[in-house]
Amino acid sequence: MATEDAGNGFNIHPMDQFVVKPLFGGDVVNWYTPTNVTLWMGLTVLAIVVLLVVGTRGRAIVPSRSQSVAEVMYGFVHKMVEDIAGKEGLKYFPYIFTLFIFILIANILGLLPTAFTTTSHIAVTAVMAMGVFIFVTILGFVKNGTKFFALFWISSAPLVLRPILALIEIISYFVRPVSHSIRLAGNMMAGHAVIKVFAGFAGALGIGAIAPIVAIMAVYGLEMLVVCIQAYVFTILTCVYLNDALHPVH
Amino acid sequence: MAVEGDLVQMGALIGAGLACTGMGGAAVGVGHVVGNYLSGALRNPAAAAGQTATMFIGIAFAEALGIFSFLVALLLMYAQ
């Protein structure tokens, strides 16, 4: 409705790429219908398997290209978990590495032309963020018992301020899954919509389309950066929350 | 001269445009975080590498609020 046809061939539909469609015709989407989301999530998992399982099959001392990519990513996330959540956090490294590589590969595949970005839907990112939130909360209570409440009761602050700070801390604790999921989905959606808007300009301008095409190339490069940074940010925040659960004293 | 069209839709679209001004605040916030990181890093380059993760966390927190305003704009435009 916001992108009506102006009548001179200048029609931009930046949000059409986010529509969930059944793969094999029809309009009804049931829970079992194979849709474009299913396809691109399947391709994401396939790409991860090819990179991590097939790529490292050689187990060479001097790694091949695909093996060194897999090793670099593994080492990167391993170091991140160790630096932020401490040695105890390494027990949960497989979960965090799974989140990181799924988000990273899904984001990168979503940048292919005509692809569907699965991580641009809040339904997808909210499942991951709620998973992290529930996991971290349960872990905090299992590891620390009632000492976990020290996260909200800041003992270094003056006594008068503590109830107010506790209220703020509790609100910020429960907003975590919301901002955690919306940050990723919003970034993906905004970036892809910007590329589509520039593509719409290119379609309308004819020979002058060279300017928006150059702009698309620039935005595409920026998006490549954003895609990696958002996967990194999602993972690092997971580590921070994990650290809060393991060491709740402020 | 009579005004044609849907008044509610006009209000929603104006509101969406106003909501996008919130992104400017996020831009200021992200610039502030990175600028301060850089000025600190130039004073003590040895300590800079250990603080990049903290910088990215700060950027993420500042940027999330800009994304919220973008989300409000989207809701006003598409989800009525």
Image (tube, rainbow, N blue to C red):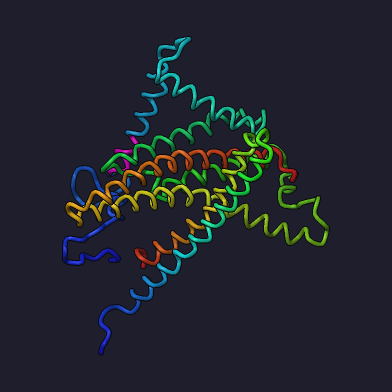
Q: Is A56 left, or right, of A161 in this rendering?
A: left
Quadrant hosting residue B45 = top right
Nearer-the-camera pick, A13 or A201: A201
Q: Where A41 sits versus A26, above or below?
A: above
- Tally of numbered discs: 0
Residue A108 rendering spot, x and y as whole percentages: 37, 37
Given residues A68 and A26, the one toward you in this image is A68
Vertical order, B33 against A39 (above or below): below
In which quadrant will I find the N terminus of chain A?
bottom left
Tell me if A114 is positioned left or right of A46 in this view.
left
Give the quadrant of residue A168: bottom right
Q: Is residue A214 above or below residue A169?
A: above
| Left or right: A35, with A121 as reference point | left
**On the rendered structure, is A111 left or right of A229?**
left
Residue found 33% across the figure and 79% down from its top: B7
Q: Tell me the residue at 51%/45% (across/down).
A: A129
Which secondary structure type mostly characterizes the magenta part of the structure? Answer: helix
Residue found at x 36% / y 65%: B77
Whether residue A34 is visible, yes or no, is no
| Depicted B47 relative to depicted A210: above or below | above
Q: Position of residue B1 (x, y in %)?
A: 25, 90
What are the residue bounds of the magenta stretch?
A36-42
- Relative image position of residue A176 (x, y in whole percent): 57, 51
User: Which residue extends farthest bottom?
Assistant: B1
Taking the magenta stretch, the answer to whether it contains residue A164 is: no
- x, y percent for residue A92: 58, 31
